[in-house]
Image (spheres, helix red, strand yellow):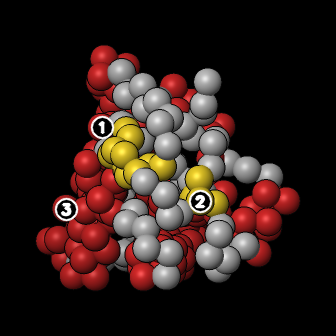
């Protein structure tokens, strides 16, 4: 039986719609994108907007906890085991990236898989340091009292620096999407909206994510964040 994720295809043949991204993965992707934008804007504005900055940061933390758990129990394309490859595989993929006969990947390609991990790690650092940060004026993170002022100041500096790291990762992510669209003729945005990707051959679609499991994990993640800050 063909494996729809690991069976790579070369572009050019007839295609058919194949399910690739489950609904929970797509929702988390777009919610994270929206909340990161909200956090960035409200952080720049400051003042009263910092209340929304804090709330969006807590929501991001809950989504990150969900995405990590979903990376182990979600549908095939969403699992870390599916898209995290070793350095040799990543290097081989990178070297052949510009070749016209380079294989396509139904889910994340080897380079894109590690970019997902890099983004999740950077957002975890941002949300985690934000819990202890302060602005020396009005705003203090919900766990500010857990650490000394010196430690809070140090974590605030990490929080501000890591903001630039996230901006860089977002720029690289958008650049990769544009590269695949213009150079390789592959639309990566549409499948993350519809969950469906045009794929060559007759491979069976991977099973969609279980709704009950996603709801349970989402509730646990939100509850954990709430208990942490309350």
In terms of image quadrants, where is residue 111?
bottom right
User: Which of the image's four quarters has the C terminus?
Assistant: top left
Would you say 193 lies left or right of 202 here?
Answer: left
Up/down of 113 relative to 74, above or below? below
In terms of image quadrants, where is residue 122?
bottom right
Q: State which mark lies toward you, 2 or 1.
A: 2
Q: State which mark lies toward you, 2 or 3.
A: 2
Q: Nearer the viewer, residue 223 or 71?
A: 71
Which residue lies at the image location 40% right of the left edge and 63% below the top edge? 188
In terms of image quadrants, where is residue 45?
bottom left
Place of residue 156 in the rendered image (x, y in percent of width and height, measured from the top left): 49, 71
Place of residue 148 in the rendered image (x, y in percent of width and height, measured from the top left): 55, 59
Place of residue 229 in the rendered image (x, y in percent of width and height, measured from the top left): 36, 41
Which residue lies at the image location 79% right of the left edge and 67% below the top edge? 91
Would you say 71 lies left or right of 131 here?
Answer: right
Instruction: For residue 16, say whether it is visible.
Output: yes
Q: Which residue is mark 2?
A: 10
Q: Which residue is mark 1?
A: 23
Would you say 79 lies left or right of 46 here?
Answer: right
Q: Give me the C-alpha separation between circle 3 and circle 1.
A: 26 Å
Q: Nearer the viewer, residue 65 or 93?
A: 93
Going from N to C along the chain, the mark reached first, 2 or 3, is: 2
Q: Please tell me whether mark 1 sits on a helix, a strand or a loop.
A: helix
Q: Which residue is mark 3?
A: 52
Judge the density around disc 2: few (<14), some (14-19), many (≥20) Cα neighbours within 10 Å.
Answer: few
> Tags 2 and 3 in contact by the CB under 8 Å rule?
no
């Amino acid at each position: 039986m063909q494996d729809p994720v690991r069976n790579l295809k070369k572009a050019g043949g007839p295609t058919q719609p194949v399910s690739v991204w489950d609904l929970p993965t797509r929702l988390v992707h777009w919610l994270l994108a929206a909340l990161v934008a909200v956090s960035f804007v409200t952080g720049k504005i400051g003042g009263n907007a910092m209340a929304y900055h804090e709330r969006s940061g807590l929501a991001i933390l809950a989504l990150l906890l969900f995405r990590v758990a979903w990376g182990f129990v979600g549908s095939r394309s969403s699992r870390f085991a599916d898209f995290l490859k070793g350095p040799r595989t990543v290097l081989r993929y990178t070297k052949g990236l510009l070749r016209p006969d380079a294989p396509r990947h139904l889910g994340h390609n080897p380079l894109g898989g590690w970019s997902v991990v890099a983004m999740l790690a950077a957002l975890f650092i941002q949300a985690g340091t934000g819990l202890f940060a302060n602005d020396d004026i009005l705003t203090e993170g919900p766990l500010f009292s857990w650490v000394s002022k010196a430690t809070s100041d140090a974590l605030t500096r990490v929080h501000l620096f890591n903001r630039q790291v996230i901006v860089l990762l977002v720029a690289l992510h958008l650049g990769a999407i544009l590269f695949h669209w213009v150079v390789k003729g592959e639309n990566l945005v549409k499948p993350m909206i519809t969950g469906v990707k045009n794929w060559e051959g007759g491979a069976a679609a991977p099973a969609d994510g279980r709704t009950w499991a996603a709801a349970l994990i989402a509730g646990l993640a939100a509850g954990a964040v709430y208990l942490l800050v309350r």
